[in-house]
């Protein structure tokens, strides 16, 4: 109880400091892939990628933050099947923008799911955390570990109070410092800061998203969960199925 009380006080202090803090933080987001190639007896599975990584940026200035994909040329993963089938796997980053007002603790997310855009509003203060007591350094910044108090999601993060803004990647926040690393569902997705620039911030990125069907966070999560279950039932629980016809 005492630790949670101290965390609450620290969060209040961090919110006050957020208005003065600015930074551009680059993250590397890595997602594990589960690919099942049906009829793959002639394909060398060792060449199939086990994960996919993209760069993202978090911009922080004047009590607000924006989390965006870094536009990169898509490079297909080419698997050489020798004399057998030749497979090219191409992945594109979805059109996502996450805007947070750190003063009002509000969040607006523009997310793409199954080729459709959704506009999701939520309250940052609804994210409740507990400290684990573990510590480490990321990019020479001292960090503490915290876990999300939410039975439906498994999220652990590392945040640094040296960076005084209550925000982080993927719309995470409500901690007394910037989140520099986030782990979703025991490593299914891991996001780690690779560079921190506390001088240069592109102010033009702070445009509130407006595109997409409006939904609450609960409505969006329920929709995604239902669609994912439908796809799991269709393909046996794998993320991606590639069928090779001979």
Image (tube, rainbow, N blue to C red):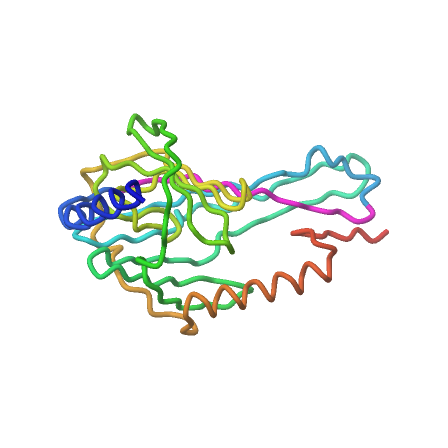
| Left or right of 79, for residue 144 | left
x then y, percent, for residue 184: 49, 45
Front-most of residues 181 and 66: 181
| Left or right of 147, for residue 116 | right
Q: Quadrant of the N terminus?
A: top left
x then y, percent, for residue 62: 16, 52
Front-most of residues 161 and 2: 2
| Left or right of 93, for residue 225 | right
| Left or right of 102, for residue 237 | right
Q: For residue 176, what is the image quadrant? A: top left
Front-most of residues 164 and 152: 152
Compared with 67, 207 (above or below) is below
Please, which residue is most extreme toward the right here? 246
Q: For residue 43, what is the image quadrant? A: top right
**Which residue appears at 36% of the width and 27% of the height?**
136
Magenta highlight on residue 31: yes
x then y, percent, for residue 84: 81, 40
Magenta highlight on residue 157: no
Which range of residues does the magenta coloring cover?
24-39
- The chief SS type of the magenta part is strand
**Which residue appears at 40% of the width and 73% of the height?**
214
Compared with 92, 177 (above or below) is above
Please, which residue is most extreme toward the front here? 1
Q: For residue 161, what is the image quadrant? A: top left
Front-most of residues 167 and 199: 167
Number of marks in picture: 0
x then y, percent, for residue 138: 35, 29
**Which residue appears at 23% of the width and 42% of the height?**
23
């Amino acid at each position: 109880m005492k630790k949670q009380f101290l965390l609450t006080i620290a969060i209040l202090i961090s919110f006050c400091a957020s208005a003065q803090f600015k930074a551009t933080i680059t993250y590397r987001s890595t997602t594990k892939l589960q690919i099942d190639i049906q009829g793959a007896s002639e394909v060398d599975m060792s060449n199939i990628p086990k994960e996919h990584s993209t760069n993202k940026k978090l911009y922080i200035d004047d009590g607000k933050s924006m989390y965006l994909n870094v536009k990169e040329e898509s490079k297909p993963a080419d698997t050489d099947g020798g004399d057998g089938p030749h497979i090219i796997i191409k992945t594109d980053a979805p059109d996502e923008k996450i805007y947070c007002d750190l003063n009002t603790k509000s969040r607006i997310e523009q997310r793409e799911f199954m080729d459709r855009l959704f506009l999701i509003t939520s309250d940052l203060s609804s994210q409740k955390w507990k400290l684990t007591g573990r510590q480490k350094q990321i990019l020479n910044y001292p960090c503490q570990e915290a876990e999300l108090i939410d039975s439906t999601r498994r999220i652990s993060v590392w945040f640094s109070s040296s960076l005084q803004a209550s925000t982080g990647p993927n719309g995470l926040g409500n901690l007394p410092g910037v989140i520099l690393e986030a782990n979703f569902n025991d490593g299914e997705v891991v996001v780690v800061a690779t560079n921190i620039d506390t001088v240069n911030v592109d102010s033009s990125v702070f445009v509130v998203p407006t595109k997409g069907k409006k939904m609450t966070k609960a409505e969006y999560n329920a929709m995604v969960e239902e669609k994912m279950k439908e796809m799991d039932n269709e393909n046996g629980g794998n993320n991606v199925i590639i069928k090779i016809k001979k």
